[in-house]
Amino acid sequence: MDDIPLGAFISMTYRSHFVKINHRMKELGLSAGQFFVLMTLSIEQGITQDSLAGKLLIDKGSIARAINVLEEKGFVKRTIDENNRRAVRLYFTETGEELIPDVLQIDREWEKAAFLGFTEEEKIQAKTLLRKIAKNSYENAYEKGDRKWKEFPLKDQ
């Protein structure tokens, strides 16, 4: 197993996660592209589109397209920030709020399958180690001073 690069495992996990999430989101008339927006909004209503792009490490155009779809389907509404007219804040509509339990269930199902055969301690350890890998990878990819560099988006817990 030492001859298989870490990136291969991460890539396989990411791709299979995307395929499963996309398949389940299609049942809701959505795609995996909207899944991560919905998950983030379920934690932080009122986030700006720019902040959302930064948290998800996705370009602003992709975020705008995902929000457009969610808005067209009546799940999300955009509101101009009263203190900064250039900032657009995102909120769930009533229909969007009703969708969240289904979206959270999709995430729980995937995570349960991914952790099949793990003890609770192993699950915690795996998440801790993957978070460290993600942070180290992020900081290695974006050097301070680089115009695209931002603080690692996941807060220490």
Image (tube, grey):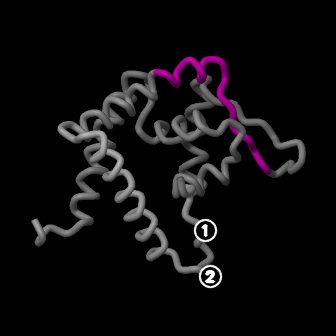
The residue carrying pointer 1 sits among few (fewer than 14), some (14 to 19) or many (20 or more) residues within 10 Å by Cα, namely: some
* Residue 93, magenta (yes or no): yes
Can you say whether 24 is above or below 59 in the image? above
Going by the image, does 5 lie left or right of 84?
A: left
Q: Which amino acid type is shown beneath numbered disc 2?
A: Gly
Residue placed at 52% from the left, 58% from the top? Answer: 57
Q: Which residue is mark 2?
A: 145
Q: CA distance from mark 1 to mark 2?
A: 9 Å
Residue 91 badge: none
Instruction: Say what secondary structure mark 2 lies in.
Output: loop
Residue 150 badge: 1
Q: Which amino acid type is shown beneath numbered disc 1?
A: Lys
Can you say whether 151 is above or below 91 in the image? below
- Tell me whether the residue at label 1 lies in contact with that at label 2, contact meaning CB atoms closer than 8 angstroms: no
Going by the image, does 104 lie left or right of 119?
A: right
Choose top left, top right, bottom left or bottom right for residue 11.
bottom left
Residue placed at 63% from the left, 30% from the top? Answer: 71
Can you say whether 144 is above or below 55 in the image? below
Image coordinates of residue 24 in percent, x first then y, are 34, 28
Can you say whether 77 is above or below 102 in the image? below
| Range of residues picked out in magenta | 87-101
Label 1 or label 2, whichever comes before in sequence order: 2
Going by the image, does 29 lie left or right of 91?
A: left
